[in-house]
Image (cartoon, helix red, strand yellow):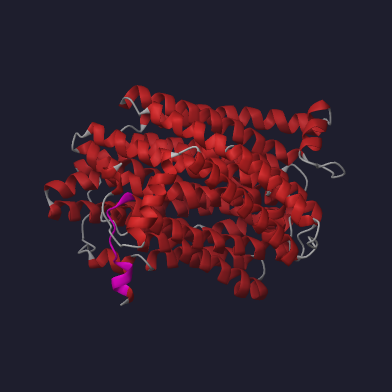
Amino acid sequence: MIKRILNLKSSNITIAALILSAASLTSALLGFFRDRLLAGRFGAGDELDIYYTAFRIPDFVNMVLIMGAISAAIVPIFTLYWSKDKEEARKFLANLLNIMFTAFAAVSLVLLIFAPQLVSVIAPGFSGAKKEMTVLLTRIMFLSPIILGTSNVLSGILHVFSRFLVTALAPIMYNLGIIFGILFFVPKIGLVGLAWGVALGAFLHLMIQLPIFLHLGFRPMKIFAPMNEGIKKVFYLMLPRSIGIGVSQINFMVMTAIGSTLAAGSIAVFNLANNLSRSFIILLAVPFSTAAFPALATVFSEGRKDEFLKKFSLSFRLLLFLIIPASAFLFILRAQVVRIIFGTGRFSWADTRLTGACLALFSISLFAYGLGLLLSRAFYAAHNTKTPTLISVSTVLVNIVLCFSFVYALQNQGCFHNFISSALKLKGLGDISIVGLPLAYSISGIIQFVLLFTFLHKKIGSVRKKEIIQTAKKTIIATIPAVVATYFSLRFFALFLNTATFGGIFAQTAGAGITGLLTYLLISVLIKSEETKLLKNFLKRYITKYKFQEIIEEN
C-alpha cells in the first residue's frame, strides 16, 4: 500500500506543483522546527557558527558535482536516450551512477584529508578549539555528499517519470534525520551529533526513493565507461552549470569568511535568516520550476517552440502571482516570524532583532531568486547552460564587491550605518555589520533576475512579455493595499494580545497575515487578475470534481 502511494504518477504541471508544494510545506515546517531546536539549544553564538561553517564545504561538493548536472545535463540526455532506446537508457544511467558515486567518494576523501586547510580558507576568523571543532564536523559531514549525490540523481530520473510525490518526500526525510541528531545525538555526544544527524538525513533521503527507482525497472550494472558518448555529453553540458553553481557556492563561502571575522553569532544569524527566506523559495518557486522542467525539456526536444513558450509563460505568471505578495508579507512580518520560529531557549531578543533585519533584506529579493530559478530551468530545458552560467558568475562578482563594501561601511558607523540602523530598527545593538551581506545578496539577485529574463527573451524568442507585464502590474496593484492592511492589522491585534507570549505573537501574526492575504485575493478578483481565475478553476474542477486534465492546454 505504501509503495503504491509513493509510486503515484502525475504528468500535469499544476497537479505536480501542488504535490510538491504540499511536501515542500511539510519540509519547510520541519526545517523551521529544526532551526528552532538549533536556535533554542545553542542561540546565535559560536556553536551554530561552527555548524553552519562545517556544513558549507560538503554542501559545495554536492551542489557543484550533482545539482547542476541533474537539471542541465542528466535529465535532458536521459530523456533523449529513453525516447530512442529504453535498454540503452538503462545502461547509460547505470554507467552514470557508477561514475558519479566513484567521483563523489574520491573528491570527498581528498577534501576530508585537507579539511584543516579548507576551514582556514572559509573561516579565517576561527582559531583554536573553534577551528578544531569545525574541522571535525566537516569531516563527518563529507559522508553526506556521497549519499546525497546518488540520491539526487535518482530524484532527477524519477521526475522524468512524474514520480513527484516520492521525490518531494526525500527532503522531509533529510530534515527528520537532522532533527533526530539534534534531539538524540547532541545530548549524548555534543555538537558532533549535528554532523551525524546530517549524515543520517542523507541516508534517509536515498532510502525513501530507492524502492520506487528499482520498481521502475532500473538495476545496478557492472559497467564503468567514462568515455561513453552519453557520459561525455553529460559532462560537457554540466560543466558550465557546475561552474555557475560553484561560483555561487564560492559566493556563500566568501560571505561565510567575512562573517567569521565579525561578532560571534554573525554566521548563525545570517544562515538562520537565509534558511527562512529559502524556505519560501522552496515552498513557492521550487515546485513550479521542478514540475515545469521535464515538460519544458520534452516539448523543446520535440521542436514545439510555441508550446515551450506557452508552458513557460503560464508557470512564470502563476509563480509571480504568488511570490510578489509573499516577499512583501515576509518583510512586514519579519520580527514576528523570527520570534515565532526561533524565539526559545538561548535565542535572545537581540538575536531576534538582528535575524529579523537580515530576513527583511533577504525578502527584498525573494521574487528575484524564485523567478530566477524558473528562468534558469527554461534555459537548461533549451540545452543552454552557458548563458545562465555567465550571468551567475557576473552577479556573484557584483555580490562579493558589495559585501565587502557594505560591511566596511557599516563597521565605520557613518551615514550608511545610521540609515540602516534606523530603517531596520537596530539602534542599541552592537556590531550590525552582518546585515551588509543580505543587502548585497539581494541587490545582486535582482540584477541576476533582470539579466536572465532579458537574455531568455533574446535567445529563445518572445516569452509573452505582454502577458507577464500585465500580471506583474495587477499583482503589484493588489499587493500594495494588502501590505497596508497587514501593517495596520499588526498594530490592531497588538492592542489586546499579549505579544510577549508565544500564543499572543502567533495569533497576532496569523491574524495580520490572514487579513493581508484576504485583501490581496479580494483586490486581485476585483481587478480581474487572470491568475485568480486559473487558481479558481483548478480548485473547482480539479480538486472537487477530480478531473485531472491538462490545465496548461486550456489556458
The residue lying toward the viewer, choosing from 111 and 283, is 283
Q: Which residue lies furthest to the front in this view?
A: 526
Image quarter of the C terminus:
top left
| Above or below, 478 relative to 38 | above
**Magenta highlight range:** 3-13
Q: Which of 399 and 515 is in front in this view?
A: 515
Residue in the foreground of this view, choosing between 510 and 481: 481
When asked about the image quadrant of residue 159, the answer is bottom left
Task: From the top left corner, tell me how far across and down residue 535 is, in percent.
Answer: 41, 49
Whether residue 305 is situated above or below residue 62 in the rendered picture? above
Query: Residue visible at 71% across and 39% down?
Result: 435
Snapshot quadrant of residue 469:
top left
Residue at the top extreme of this rendering: 458
Answer whether residue 359 is visible to the viewer in this image: no
The residue positioned 24% from the left and 56% from the top of the image is: 94
Q: In this view, does 118 lie to the left or right of 540?
A: right
Q: Specify the quadrant that holds the N terminus.
A: bottom left
Q: x, y percentage for residue 519?
A: 59, 47
Expressed as whole percent of the image width and height from the top left, the position of residue 262 reads 75, 42
Residue 280: x and y, percent?
Answer: 54, 50
Let me know if residue 11 is in the magenta part: yes
Residue 300 visible: yes
Q: Which residue lies furthest to the right in this view?
A: 428
Residue 440 is inside the magenta segment: no
Count up the numbered dots: 0
Residue 373, relative to residue 400: is it above or below?
below
Q: Is residue 71 left or right of residue 528?
A: left
Location of residue 242 (image quadrant): top left
